Structure formats: C-alpha cells, structure tokens
Image (cartoon, rainbow, N blue to C red):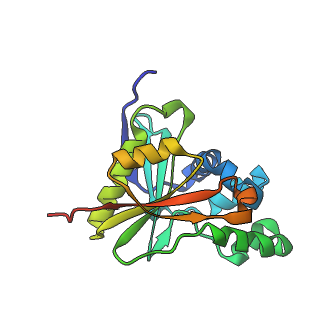
Amino acid sequence: MQPVDFTVTKGFSDHERAQIAALYWEAFTQKLHHVLGPEDKALQFIAAHLHPDFALIARDTEGQILGVAGFKTQQGALIGGSLRDIAETYGWLSACWRAPLLALVERDLAEGVLLMDGICVSAQARGMGLGTALLDAIKQEAATQGLNAVRLDVINTNPRARALYQREGFREIGQENLGPFKYVFGFDSSTQMLCPIAPVP
C-alpha cells in the first residue's frame, strides 16, 4: 500500500460535514445501526450535530479527509443532540426509545480528563499510521487544555484497537457489561482505558 502524506488539524468546515458523518457511520454502524438507523436518517442526524471544536481531522495533501478523532470535555463533544434534536430527525415516538438507548453508551466525564469520543480511519488509509497520529493529536489536545489524562472505551469485539491503545500507553482501569443490551449494540462489554498526560512545559 502506497504511503500517504497527511496532516492532523482541529476543526472542519460545513461542507465537510457529510463526509465526516459517512466516515463515522462506517466505523460505528455495527454499534449504532439499531439505535440510529436507517442509514439515511443516521447520516442526516450525525451531520447536523457534529461540532468542529471537538474534532481532530487527518487530511491528505489535497485536503481529502482520511480520519477523524472526536473528544469530549465539560464544554461539549464531537456529536451532540438533545431529545428534541432526535425527534426532529426520527419523530417524537421514535425518539422516546432511541434517546434512552443512546444514554446507555454515553460516558461520564471526570475532572482533568479528556474523553476520546470515537476514532475512525477511512478504509483506503488504514495501515498508514493515521490511528497513531490521531491518538497523538488527542493527547496533545489534552495537554494543551491543561488536562492530566485521556480516557477511552474500547469494545470487546475490537481487539486490534485495544492493542493499539496499549502500545500508545493506555492501561485498563475498568470494564462495563451491557447485559441484554448486547443484542442492541452488537458487543458484550467495553474496557475503560486511561493514559496519563504530561503537562505542557
């Protein structure tokens, strides 16, 4: 596979929303298709509620988006959306069961910790170091904000991602089991991992 030159920067423009939504949906369809599907509705909802202040984007030299890493702090997250927002896309009746299910996979914030809120790399750019570069950018963002750690959750059906996180300094701090909701989200459990961040000198 031919290596690709790329840069990672914060934020995106409105015309890139659809592309980022498609990339995110491709990465997380297995987990979210029962809750946010069908695909056209999911893409509409995600694109409408992406927040550029909480996105780190990998682009090639022509500006094509190759990967996205989202994060969450006390100020917001990559993907927002209230109950009303869900209802605007899916209708109120549908929103009443979708919103509680989405809440099951929400992660609580902790003081001084940046929460990674999804990382995805396009199929044609995998194996080129983008995942590592995006993780490095997430760590740098945490350091810039004066935070002391990055936390993420990795599902039990994604051992490749867990191995990457371990190589990048993340260590297990806990586990969460979904119980019967595993049939909704397509995985049994998730592992919480934490990486300490050195302060910016």
Q: Is residue 36 visible?
A: no
Counting the numbered discs, the total is 0
Looking at the image, residue 1 sits to the left or right of residue 46; the answer is left
Q: Is 167 or 92 nearer to us in this picture?
A: 167
Question: Residue 4's spot in the image, x, y percent?
Answer: 40, 29
Q: Quadrant of residue 140?
A: bottom left
Q: Quadrant of residue 100?
A: bottom right
Residue at 48 percent across and 45 percent down: it is 161
Residue at 45 percent across and 31 percent down: it is 127
Q: Is residue 166 above or below residue 145?
A: above
Q: Is residue 46 visible?
A: yes
Q: Quadrant of residue 114?
A: bottom left
In the rendered view of the protein, which quadrant contains the C terminus? bottom left
Question: Residue 54's spot in the image, x, y percent?
Answer: 45, 63
Q: Is residue 53 above or below residue 16?
A: below
Residue at 77 percent across and 55 percent down: it is 37
User: Which residue is farthest top?
Assistant: 1
Question: Residue 42's spot in the image, x, y percent?
Answer: 72, 56
User: Which residue is farthest right?
Assistant: 93
Q: Is 184 or 81 nearer to us in this picture?
A: 184
Question: Residue 98's spot in the image, x, y percent?
Answer: 75, 69
Q: Is residue 157 above or below residue 60?
A: below
